[in-house]
Image (cartoon, rainbow, N blue to C red):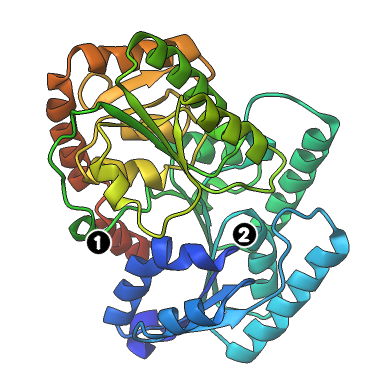
Amino acid sequence: MKAHEHKPTVALIVPYAPAVPLFRRPLLQELAGRGFTSLVYAPDWTEALEKALEQERGVRALHYPLKRTSISPLADLKTLLSLAVSLAHSQPHLVLTFQPKPNIYGILAAALARVPLRAAVVEGLGFAFTPGEETLKKRVVRAALKALYRLSFTFAHKVFFLNPDDLKEFVSQGLVRPEKAVLLGGIGVPLEDWPPAPPHLEPLTFTLIARLLREKGVREFAEAARRVKALHPETRFLLIGPLDNNPGAIGEEEVRAWVKEGILEWVPWTEDVRPYLRQTSVYVLPSYREGVPRSTQEAMAMARPVITTDVPGCRETVVPGVNGFLVPPRDIQALVEAMERLILEPSLVEKMGKESRRLAEERFDSRKVNERFLRELGLE
């Protein structure tokens, strides 16, 4: 029985409902355009979010219990059983999971519910796999995650990765069989929603959009801002992103101290980053590791040069010297020097911005990505 002959139901399992309209809408629209019904499982639907999602053709929102940052076995067992019961009732043809806990418990639940096709998307390895400070808790969490991934992905038919480093690591450690692993590349952005903007040169503005976590390089961005403003006080630095409760979270007091010092401006939340990207000269992401960062793809689509780190996921977004610069992770001075290069040669802002847009069209067009994604899943 071929999937496209019966237009079956597809279930997406995600950890965070507010991200669905931002990250999953192009895929849901592509599925609807092909006649599929989509069920989107998330733990934290609000009435407004649910109504907005269900205005999309062929999409329904469903709830399940999930504690994203908890390491409670009882809470995780509740997640697993709730999903298994619901999936057995809804009987989708395909379950598609995103992020660590859905990838583990969603795939296991789908196997228990005898869902015919099960696929996971590894969009990044998260705090436990990010190089840096090693604590006992981090080692224990990483060991547990490896064991759970190895178990869960035994029951997955395909596991998609956004960058080759993550794929290689999972295969080499025996977390997924090589014949199941598929390199997808970035999830892409709908380019028509992110049109190129004219270069912004006055004042020269550097922007970071991220959850406020150590591993996103937020502290390095703030310290680079301090050093650059000491040399070039007219430059502007924008930090856009919410506080978080993950182990690597940066506290509000520290962020507000940066604002009070005058080294950067902080926007804790916005539903639309495009107005801020129009005010941006250069997009900066000093992260320690990513899948392939969506924020960088959006900045590239809007024709912004990129300064990011030479680490898995981030390096997929920059051709050095063409659309931006790669710097070593945690190297504040290298970050400062890359920023200064663009301050001292502002003509590069426009030139590299155009190259960013070209690369976004080549690599990160969500329509092309989703076509390949669905072809790999047999949903044509």
Provide the secondary structure element on which disc 2 rests.
Answer: helix
Amino acid type of disc 1? Arg
Q: Quadrant of residue 1?
A: bottom left
- Name the amino acid type tagged 2: Asn
Vertical position of residue 66 compared to residue 93: above or below = above
Measured Cα–Cα span from mark 2 to mark 1:
24 Å
Mark 1 surroundings within 10 Å by alpha-carbon count, few (fewer than 14), some (14 through 19), many (20 or more): some
Can the viewer see residue 93 in this picture?
Answer: no
* First reached walking from the N terminus: tag 2 or tag 1: 2
Residue plotted at (35% across, 57% down)? 272
Left or right: 366 with respect to 250?
left
Is residue 146 something that shows in the picture? yes
**Where does the image place residue 168, in percent across and percent down from the top left?**
52, 36
Camera-side residue of 248 and 133: 248
Q: At which x and y percent is residue 227? A: 45, 12
Q: Mark 2 points at which residue?
A: 103
Q: 300 and 100: which one is in front?
A: 300
Q: Name the residue under label 1.
A: 367
Q: Nearer the viewer, residue 79 or 274?
A: 274
**Image side of residue 75 versus residue 375, left or right:** right
**What SS does tag 1 mark?**
helix
Q: How many marks?
A: 2
* Residue 36 drawn at (x, y percent): 37, 83
